[in-house]
Image (spheres, rainbow, N blue to C red):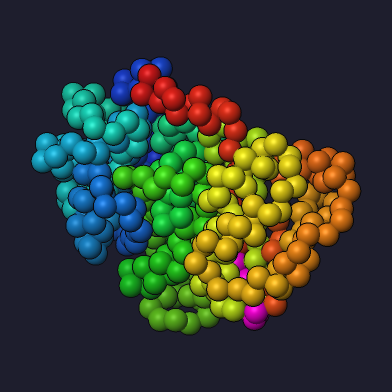
Amino acid sequence: MLILENPSITDVNGIKATGISAGIKKNGKRDMALIYSEVEAVSAAAFTTNRVQAAPIKLDKEHIKNNITRAIVVNSGNANACTGEQGYQNALDTCKMVAEKLGIKTEEVLVQSTGVIGVDLPMDKIKNGIDLLVEDLGEKGNFAAEAIMTTDLTKKVYGLEIELSGKKVKIIGMAKGSGMIHPNMATMLGFVVTDANISKEMLQEAHKEVVEDSYNMISVDGDTSTNDMACVLANGLAHNEKITSLNNDFYKFKEALKKVSEELAKKIAEDGEGATKFLEVEVTGAKDKKNAQILAKSLITSNLAKCAFFGADANWGRILCAMGYSGGEFDTEKVTIDFISGDYRMRVAEKGRGIAFDEKYAKELLLNKNIRVEIMLEDGEASAKAWGCDLSYDYVKINGDYRS
């Protein structure tokens, strides 16, 4: 795999994009994005598990069944969630307007929204925004990455180049998310584009597995949004031998897609609202992968543990406690916990019991921004990673006046 420097989704063959300000956000920042494939493409997606689902989610679940996807239109600043029949009609009308402007079918357009819940889309601004998007469509992927942001502090883009059947293939994604982030789809949106030649069935197979190991392994605050969506679009312009079965090229593609999605997920966790620390948790020696994932998630979703990391308090007992109520299976007498930052490693618990350690050294280690927690079990060979952040005063400030 070749990691691409300063990638843009428009580096992928046949992909055009842009982002503009349609006036949906009060601050005048970019708030609408358009991704367009110049040729027919196949797509796969995963959606929020929240029972309250925004209008775009309901519509996209129908449009994703189509054999062809050509465009994705996104607005930020308004979630179009809890908006009833009118919200669904507004999402559909948005797709229709994009399709008409691009000369494609309505069902070939996916739509997404992110922002405040319970407010109708300002359709006059949406219509004008679509006109501007189509006029401005080009090599402007970074504008698109900026336009999908809400409380995000940074754009989130990552890309790789691999070789499939002798052809160079690019896989590049962009994402947004920093709050309402929780396993089983976070408020995150992820859009990956690739010029790989792959069938819709195999793309969905790869994407389904990838989501479990990436977007579903992050948490910021324990809230699962109404609008979460992770989508991948493949247009075949790399002209590799088409992937139609579980062959070597499929697994090579899936591994690259996993890497891109994983890195985007980590960027979301690192940009958590008010976060001062980025946490990576690895569980090793678990009974099976399912239990490893449950136990890894237990730490990044524990508010008490996240507060301890914010305060640089080596309170390992909160970690063991969170594991205990997670529902995961493990031998409590065979748990060893290490804190790691850079080249520094410190053991704080062994065989399910506390051990003597240098509190001052632990404080210095936990004051670093990037912290890794390694939880070692003796129950099997499985492992899993999860990513999150600490919980700070600023998280409350940000979400105390989100609508304003």
Which residue is nearer to you in this view: 292 or 16? 292
Residue 108 locus on image (x, y percent):
23, 53
Residue 29 locus on image (x, y percent):
42, 22
Residue 396 locus on image (x, y percent):
50, 29
- State which region is magenta: 379-384
Which residue is nearer to you in this view: 32 or 301? 301
| Residue located at (40% from left, 67% from top) | 208
| Residue located at (20% from left, 50% from top) | 59
| Residue located at (60% from left, 67% from top) | 384
* Quadrant location of the C terminus in the rendered image: top left
| Residue located at (22% from left, 63% from top) | 65
* Quadrant location of the N terminus in the rendered image: bottom right
Is residue 148 in view from this perspective? Answer: yes
Looking at the image, how many numbered discs can be counted on the residues?
A: 0
Which residue is nearer to you in this view: 179 or 242? 179
Up the image or down, 73 lies above or below 352; here it is: above
Which residue is nearer to you in this view: 51 or 212? 51
Q: Indicate whether residue 330 is drawn in magenta.
A: no
Whether residue 363 sits left or right of residue 111 in the image: it is right
Up the image or down, 325 lies above or below 302; here it is: below
Residue 243 locus on image (x, y percent):
42, 75
Is residue 193 in view from this perspective? Answer: no
Up the image or down, 17 lies above or below 22; here it is: below
Whether residue 107 sits left or right of residue 211 in the image: it is left
Whether residue 51 sits left or right of residue 394 in the image: it is left
